[in-house]
Image (cartoon, helix red, strand yellow):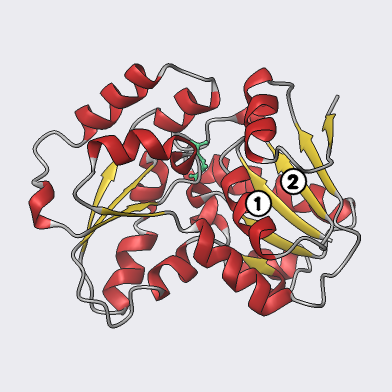
Amino acid sequence: MIGIFDSGSGGLTVLRALRDRLTSPDVLYFGDIKNAPYGSKSHDELSQLTIDAISFLRQRGVRSIISACNSVSASLAVSLFDTLEIAPAHLIEMVGPTVALFKNSKERLLLTATPATVKSSLYRQGFKMIGKDVVEIPIPDLAGSIESGAKESVLEEKITAAFAGVRLQDFDVLILACTHYPLILSVFQRIFGSLIILDPAHVVSERAEREWWPREAGDGKTHFVISRDSECFRDFVKRLFPKTDYTIEVLQ
Ligand code: DGL
């Protein structure tokens, strides 16, 4: 069984991309809505939440995990693999596959993410290793507002304020390095029409297929577990998976 986790609804964009490729694995999705948003938390807090989420998924019988949350990527340290007895080959995160996509590319990169992701400097370091520069723009509280179903005009305002002073003509690609952001892709497309907008979910799901298929073949069951009930989460699930049979469980 494949486990996917995020602070809430963002990882649904990764699950959707995975389902576009693979219908048969059983998937357990954990959205930690009780503790959302993650993007404004400290590294210590995120490390604990990461350990809790991975432990939970493993207790439920998950073998292979996608960490569909950029904000916790810095917490996926080598020591975690030993502590939680998880083999590195059984965990895929967002940063590595995304950076690897730009090896040998000449495109000028702009990236947007939560403040926690930008602060971790993981993307910056990754791009440096392949000899590329990236300009990173954090958007405070955008993921939280998406999670709580804020109006598009409010979301648009937050994005525009964060990018004030950025010369878009200096860039070719905008990387959406927060899994919540592709949930409002049309808003980003409206503001950044001149740029190629990259949703890393596609390359991450491609990696999962390459690494785990056909090992993770199952009955195609989809089960969502959330740490607090949320109408918005239920709406996103309905919107993204209109033809899928699924179950939703709220942790008590
Ligand atoms: N969707 C997550 C990410 O990719 C977390 C966003 C949040 O909860 O602030 O960073």
Q: Residue furthest front?
A: 243
Left or right side of 68 for 179: left
**What is the distance, in whole Å, between disc 1 and disc 2 at their CAs?**
8 Å
Q: Name the front one of labels 1 and 2.
A: 1
Q: Earlier in the sequence, mark 1 or mark 2?
A: 1
Is 230 rendered above or below residue 84?
Answer: above
Q: Which residue is mark 2?
A: 29
Q: Amino acid at mark 2?
A: Tyr
Residue 202 image position (x, y, % from top left): 52, 61
Mark drawn on residue 56: none
Q: Position of residue 241 (x, y in %)?
A: 69, 41
- Judging depth in this view, the residue of 203 and 88 nearest the camera is 203
| Residue at horizontal 59 percent and vertical 52 percent from the top | 14
Residue at (40, 30) in percent of width and height: 142
Q: Is residue 44 left or right of residue 161?
A: right
Q: Residues within 10 Å of mark 1 (few under 14, many from 20)?
A: many
Q: Quadrant of the C terminus?
A: top right
Q: In the rendered image of this protein, does residue 33 appear above or below residue 181?
A: above
**Image coords of residue 62 (percent x, y):** 83, 59
What amino acid is at disc 1? Answer: Leu
The residue sitting at 66% across, 65% down in the picture is 21
Comparing 204 with 251, the one in front is 204
Mark 2 is surrounded, within 10 Å at the Cα level, by few (under 14), some (14 to 19) or many (20 or more) other residues, namely many
Residues tagged 1 and 2 counted as in contact (Cβ below 8 A) = yes
State which quadrant residue 131 falls in.
bottom left
The quadrant the N terminus occupies is bottom right
Compared to 186, does 28 lie above or below? below
Q: Which residue is mark 1?
A: 15
Above or below: residue 211 compared with residue 22: below
